[in-house]
């Protein structure tokens, strides 16, 4: 897995470290993580606790240092009561391409164990 993980990252920089490849779509996604969390009134510490992760995990997610995987993404959607489509409402240039997709009332939302 380590080799595969390294293959998904960028080439070594001049100092030998590897930088994650974040395209424009991911760069547009990162601030939406914070926006969704703040809209629910949750602190990073509360989200991290619900996900059973250290607080630094959410900080790294919201700054783009940690690339959110599919399972983590679905857990965050559930916590924030947002449909996955909500997070892709912006184009790479920041223009809105869709409306906000908050789960309508009455839609079952999976709750995280605490």
Image (cartoon, helix red, strand yellow):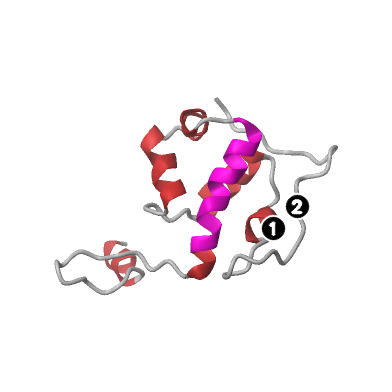
Is residue 75 among the parts visible in the rendering? no
What is the x, y in percent for residue 81?
A: 69, 40
Give the class, few, some or many, for how many residues have Cα within 10 Å of label 1's Cα (few <14, many ≥20): few
What is the x, y in percent for residue 72?
A: 51, 48
- Which quarter of the figure is the N terminus placed in? bottom left
Q: Is residue 59 above or below residue 99?
A: above
Mark 1, residue position: 85
Q: Is residue 34 above or below residue 11?
A: above
- Along the horizontal axis of the image, is 52 left or right of 74? left
- The answer to whether mark 2 and mark 1 are in CB contact below 8 A is yes
Q: Kindly give the residue lying farthest to the top in the view shown.
A: 114
- Along the horizontal axis of the image, is 110 left or right of 114? right
| Residue at x 64%, y 61% (from the top left corner) | 88
Mark 2, residue position: 101
The rendered magenta stretch, by its main secondary structure, is classed as helix
Q: Kindly give the residue lying farthest to the bottom in the view shown.
A: 11
Q: Any magenta on residue 6? A: no
- Which quarter of the figure is the C terminus placed in? top right
User: What secondary structure is marked by label 2?
Assistant: loop
Q: CA distance from mark 2 to mark 1?
A: 6 Å
Q: Kindly give the residue lying farthest to the left in the view shown.
A: 15
| Residue at x 63%, y 45% (from the top left corner) | 77
User: What secondary structure is marked by label 1?
Assistant: helix
Q: Any magenta on residue 35? A: yes
| Residue at x 69%, y 54% (from the top left corner) | 86
Q: Nearer the viewer, residue 70 or 44?
A: 44
| Residue at x 16%, y 72% (from the top left corner) | 14
Extent of the magenta region: 27-41
């Amino acid at each position: 897995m380590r080799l595969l993980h390294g293959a998904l990252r960028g080439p070594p920089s001049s100092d030998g470290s590897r930088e994650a490849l974040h395209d424009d779509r991911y760069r547009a996604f990162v601030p939406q993580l914070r926006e969704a969390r703040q809209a629910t009134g949750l602190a990073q510490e509360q989200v991290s606790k619900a996900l059973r992760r250290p607080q630094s995990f959410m900080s790294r997610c919201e700054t783009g240092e940690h690339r959110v995987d599919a399972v983590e993404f679905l857990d965050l959607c559930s916590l924030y009561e947002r449909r996955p489509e909500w997070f892709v409402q912006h184009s790479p240039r920041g223009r809105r391409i869709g409306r906000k997709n908050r789960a309508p009332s009455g839609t079952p939302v999976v709750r995280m164990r605490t």
